[in-house]
Image (cartoon, rainbow, N blue to C red):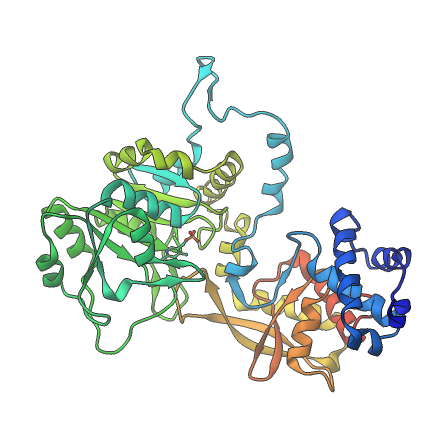
């Protein structure tokens, strides 16, 4: 046995240290601790440099970072719909309705009037049709599923026209051309990256063509010498040539969103009003609801999708349907404050400043500086647009901004800020009022020095 191994803290001491920090101690944590101890036995440098307390500390930090599944995180990035932090968040009062409804059975597919199997409850579908003017609606797992279903139902084995300027890749594994391929449709590239004309589409239409696809350029902008075909011309062309018109709206604003910079995110209604037959979007981006794919369109097109066998594989579960319905109900009532994503997007900078000042007052002033920032909507909406916000610049002599970034991420309730121009910033735009006390504790704990009494 390696003599250094005697420095390893015994399990009961580790348990006590974990308990002191309020860290969970289930079976998974026990397994994780076992792995960490094995890792330490293989790592002489760590064993040589750290004393027993240091080793305990190292183990606790690793457990805090790795144990369990999802846990609360404070979003100090200034990006409201943060794709890596769970996108849209929910109102507490809405979540409070879940236990009563879902700890029992529901009328999901039961006709209470007739006493027999019925249609899946369609509250959310009716609401979104009323709010957008769509003839019909369908909900699936996410926007990627929505696209897959539409492409497979109307484009399989046929050609789909798409501008070269709209062949986007969105975070991770989502690329429009690959999506098309997976659906069995054949991509026909139109125009060039910067310029696409109506005549390019007209020339490309052949006997195999089934669909005109338009995709929102979620995360980039094409500027300079550019031109694209106006939506209404594309819609008219599709109608004239008997093709399906499908638009992937991406972020899915129910109402047009403008940040003051001139650019606006179009709402569903305006696109449907121009005659778009099928429009898809995400439920958890600008809409502010649960993860879902929203498909709006004409009754004839939506009916075809409902009958497609793939729909059965992609449909939403009852909790998602309920959360969607409730989110849409808040839209119908104009109750933005019940939809956190919308509340944050609409909130004036002054409200962010108030939150920043509350935190400032509770923390050591010499380590914090209030700085104006630009926050972004995120979720692929209005790329390159931003709104005025405020952040706290955390300064600790001798500690770099990257070290601060890591220290805040290592807390029991991690704070994810951002580093900009050598400064570690915690933006208050996407921090809720309820989270302020936890944020104050987090800042105090990091300023008190590494690894001392994590909140
Ligand atoms: C985000 C996005 C998607 C993917 O949506 P998910 O809901 O994540 O599946 C597809 N298309 C565009 C244009 C997007 O912005």
Where on the picture, by quarter, is residue 433?
A: bottom right
Q: Tell me if residue 216 comes above or below residue 403 in the rendering.
A: above
Residue placed farthest to the bottom in the image?
A: 398
How far across and down, in percent of the image, does residue 284 sit? Answer: 47, 51
Residue at left offset 40%, top offset 33%: 312
Q: Indicate left or right for 254 with 153 as reference.
A: right
Pick whichever, 307 or 447, lies toward us: 307
Residue 285 visible in this rendered orientation of the protein: yes
How far across and down, in percent of the image, does residue 228 sit? Answer: 20, 66
Residue 347 visible in this rendered orientation of the protein: no
Locate the C terminus by quadrant.
bottom right
Pick whichever, 264 or 283, lies toward us: 283
Where on the picture, by quarter, is residue 313?
A: top left
Residue at left offset 68%, top offset 59%: 435
Locate the N terminus by quadrant.
bottom right
Quadrant observed for ligand 1 in the rendered image: bottom left
Pick whichever, 411 or 382, lies toward us: 411
């Amino acid at each position: 046995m390696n003599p250094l191994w005697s420095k390893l803290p015994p399990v009961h001491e580790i348990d006590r240290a974990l308990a002191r920090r309020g860290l969970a101690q289930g079976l998974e944590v026990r397994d994780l601790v076992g792995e960490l101890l094995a890792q330490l036995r293989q790592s002489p440098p760590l064993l040589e440099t750290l004393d027993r307390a240091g080793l305990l500390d190292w183990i606790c930090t690793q457990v805090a970072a790795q144990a369990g599944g999802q846990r609360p995180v404070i979003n100090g990035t200034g990006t409201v719909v943060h794709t890596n932090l769970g996108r849209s968040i929910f109102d507490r009062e809405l979540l409070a309705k879940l236990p009563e409804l879902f700890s029992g059975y529901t009328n999901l597919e039961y006709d209470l009037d007739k006493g027999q199997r019925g249609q899946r409850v369609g509250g959310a579908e009716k609401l979104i049709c009323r709010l957008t003017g769509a003839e019909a609606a369908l909900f699936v797992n996410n926007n990627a599923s929505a696209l897959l279903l539409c492409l497979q139902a109307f484009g399989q084995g046929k050609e789909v026209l798409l501008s070269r300027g709209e062949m986007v890749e969105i975070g991770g594994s989502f690329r429009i051309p690959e999506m098309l391929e997976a659906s069995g449709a054949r991509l026909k590239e139109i125009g060039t990256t910067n310029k696409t004309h109506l005549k390019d589409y007209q020339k490309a239409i052949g006997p195999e063509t089934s669909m005109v696809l338009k995709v929102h350029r979620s995360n980039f902008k094409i500027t300079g010498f550019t031109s694209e075909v106006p939506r209404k011309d594309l819609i008219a062309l599709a109608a004239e040539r008997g093709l399906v018109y499908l638009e992937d709206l991406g972020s899915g604003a129910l109402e047009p969103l403008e940040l003051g910079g001139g650019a606006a995110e179009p709402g569903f209604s305006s696109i449907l009003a121009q005659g778009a037959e099928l429009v898809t979007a995400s439920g958890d981006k600008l809409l502010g609801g649960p993860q879902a794919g929203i498909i709006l369109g004409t009754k004839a097109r939506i009916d075809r999708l409902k009958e497609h066998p793939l729909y059965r594989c992609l449909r939403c579960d009852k909790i998602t349907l309920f959360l969607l319905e409730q989110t849409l109900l808040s839209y119908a009532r104009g109750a933005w404050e019940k939809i956190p994503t919308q509340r944050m997007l609409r909130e004036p900078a002054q409200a962010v400043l108030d939150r920043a000042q509350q935190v400032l007052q509770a923390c050591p002033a010499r380590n914090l500086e209030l700085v104006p920032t630009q926050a972004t909507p995120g979720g692929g909406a209005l790329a390159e647009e931003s709104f005025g916000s405020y952040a706290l610049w955390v300064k600790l002599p001798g500690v770099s901004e990257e070290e601060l970034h890591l220290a805040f991420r290592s807390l029991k309730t991690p704070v994810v800020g951002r580093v900009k121009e050598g400064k570690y910033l915690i933006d208050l735009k996407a921090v809720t009022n309820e989270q302020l006390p936890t944020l104050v504790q987090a800042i105090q704990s990091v300023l008190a020095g590494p690894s001392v009494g994590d909140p």
